[in-house]
Amino acid sequence: MSPSPVESAPAMVDLAVENLERFAAAFFHAAGPALTTSLNKPLTVQVVQVATTTVKALLDDLDAPWAMIEMTYQRGMTGTHWLIVSRRNALVLAADPTAEVVDLESRHKEAIRDTVNQLLHAAGPPLMPLFARSVAWAPVTVHVVARDEELPGDLAMDQRLWVARAQAQGEGTQIDLALTIDEGLAHDICSFRPGAEAAEPAAPGERREREAGAPSKIDLILDVTLPVAVELGRARMQIQDILKLAPGSVIALDKSAGDPVELFINERPIAKGEVVIIDENFGVRLTSIVTATERIRTLR
């Protein structure tokens, strides 16, 4: 059985802390913009501490009831993180900080679920260089826990784990976030060696060996999904005309009938085509497309 990072020799503990701090920094790297978009207020997120503790000690620091958000890896890693916040911070995540409720209601749980799903979506790309693979999570589950004996999942009050504490701040708002990293996940994260990407250039023979056995940088993102949109045309309208719209109204676009439609990826145009019908569904037959180099730039 592999030793726990907590019980390892001091040098290994230092490496564990270093790698877990890198993980926490990457995980929360894009949390600020994600929370800003979700809560409609500018917020920045900073990692405050990465340390070991027990579930009991962690919950003793937070006012009950607690929102315990279950985040299970769906791709790239195996295991579950818990994002744990107090009732007050949960209401802020639900965009309802002034609510006078003793317990979190279903509408709050739904709002928290949407916010945290956006946070996880933003966390994937910053974690890719650390894991050397893309990661994704299943849709999160929000548990509201008022008493110790109601702990969900496999959590136990005496369980020892790592916790990454972070704070989101801005415009009189502060959200304290506690992200758990259990022993199994900590062991996997600690297996990555810091600075691997910044190693010295390899000799020609070593370089050929790496190229034969290791994926290229583009290979690491081949299974990442991107939004694809097809635009028929655009129009600009005055607000007074928008307010007059009703079922049956016709909006004139800036294109003539028969003009090619445009295909956008990441909000950047990459192709033109014509609309076709495929098994009663709309599709687009591409008539022109930008170069592969331009398409790579679109992925950024």
Image (spheres, rainbow, N blue to C red):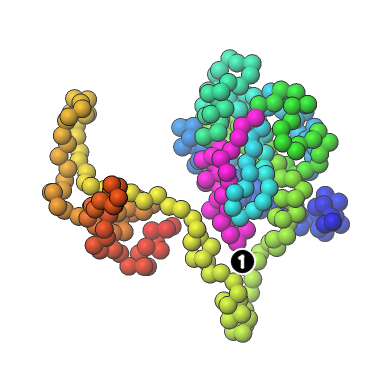
- Rendered location of residue 182, percent (x, y): 74, 45
| Quadrant assignment for the N terminus | bottom right
The residue depicted at 57 percent of the width and 76 percent of the height is 211
> Is 247 located above or below residue 277 in the figure?
above
Quick check: is 125 in the magenta stretch? yes
Q: Which residue is nearer to you in this view: 99 or 140? A: 140
Q: Is residue 127 left or right of residue 153?
A: left
Q: Is residue 116 left or right of residue 185?
A: left
- Residue 52 seen in render: yes
The residue depicted at 57 percent of the width and 44 percent of the height is 138
Quick check: is 45 in the magenta stretch? no
Q: Residues within 10 Å of mark 1 (few under 14, many from 20)?
A: few
Query: Which residue is farthest bottom?
Result: 205
Callout 1 amino acid: Glu
> Is 213 located above or below residue 254 in the figure?
below
- Rendered location of residue 38, percent (x, y): 48, 35
- Which quadrant would residue 174 be assigned to in this image? top right
- Rendered location of residue 134, percent (x, y): 56, 56
Q: Is residue 227 left or right of residue 67?
A: left
Q: Which residue is mark 1?
A: 197
Q: Element at badge 1?
A: helix
- Residue 21 seen in render: no
The residue depicted at 64 percent of the width and 71 percent of the height is 199
- Rendered location of residue 106, percent (x, y): 56, 23
Q: Which residue is nearer to you in this view: 106 or 255? A: 106
| Quadrant assignment for the C terminus | bottom left
Q: Which residue is nearer to you in this view: 239 or 233? A: 233
Q: In the image, which residues are magenta?
A: 116-143
